Amino acid sequence: MNTPPASAPEPAPAEADGHRWLTAEEQRVWRSYLHATTLLEDHLDRQLQRDAGMPHIYYGLLVKLAEASQHRLRMTELAMDAKITRSRLSHAIARLERSGWVRREDCPSDKRGQFAVLTDQGLQVLRRTAPGHVTAVRQALFERLSPAQQKSLGEIMQIIAEGLQPNEAGADLPWLR
């Protein structure tokens, strides 16, 4: 059992000092989740850096553009899909532009709006990189889980995502920052 550091509060009792602390089991699950997701993201970043010279988030942007109609999305929509700030997206798109994989186009109906467009070169990089990425994902995740565990993981992640996706107006969302 993991013991919390001396400076951390006791993980249980649930309502001690007015706070509902994590139980020992909840703490174990939480730390396992953090450990696994950190290692998985690092594993995928290293694979993509090695194979394509880009981080995982950039690969995800290229995938979203490849799946979009005419391989183009408004920058705001791309930030929303990627769940990142507009500033972070702008930085990523600038780097992808320098590589020749994406270009920006002004939106004819909105002078302030821009589109990110996947170039032919970007599509080629994506097609060349995708098989290795899929292999890395399979080895790191799916080959370690039974079909029932995969189904459960998908259901659990959907519940968490739905619970964290605010629907109210004025919500503090990354792509609005």
Image: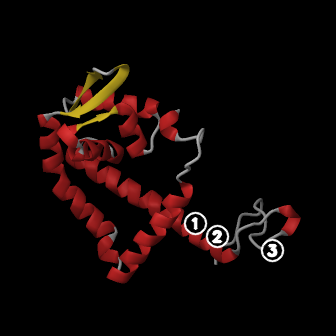
Contact check, label 1 and label 2, Cβ < 8 Å: yes
Whole-angstrom CA distance, mark 3 to mark 1, is: 18 Å
Q: Secondary structure at mark 1?
A: helix
Q: How is this picture coloured?
A: secondary structure
Q: Nearer the viewer, residue 121 or 10?
A: 121
Taking the image as shown, residue 87 lies to the left or right of residue 19, namely: left
User: Which disc number belongs to residue 13?
Assistant: 3
- Location of residue 17 (image quadrant): bottom right
Q: Secondary structure at mark 2?
A: helix
Q: Nearer the viewer, residue 83 or 76?
A: 76
Q: Secondary structure at mark 3?
A: loop
Whole-angstrom CA distance, mark 3 to mark 2, is: 13 Å
Q: Position of residue 18 (x, y in %)?
A: 86, 62
Instruction: Check the image and name the residue furthest to the top.
Output: 111
Circle 3 residues within 10 Å: few <14, some 14–19, many ≥20: some
User: Which disc number belongs to residue 130?
Assistant: none
- Location of residue 55 (image quadrant): top left
What residue is drawn where x is 32% and y is 51%? Answer: 46
Residue at the disc numbered 2 = 27
Amino acid type at circle 3 is Pro
Residue at the disc numbered 1 = 31
Q: Is residue 167 visible?
A: yes
Taking the image as shown, residue 156 lies to the left or right of residue 20, namely: left
Contact check, label 3 and label 1, Cβ < 8 Å: no
Q: Position of residue 146 (x, y in %)?
A: 34, 82
Instruction: Tell me which numbered mark, 3 or 1, is placed earlier along the sequence.
Output: 3
Whole-angstrom CA distance, mark 1 to mark 2, is: 6 Å
Circle 1 residues within 10 Å: few <14, some 14–19, many ≥20: few
Q: Position of residue 96 (x, y in %)?
A: 27, 32
Taking the image as shown, residue 161 lies to the left or right of residue 110, namely: right
What residue is drawn where x is 44% and y is 71%? Answer: 155
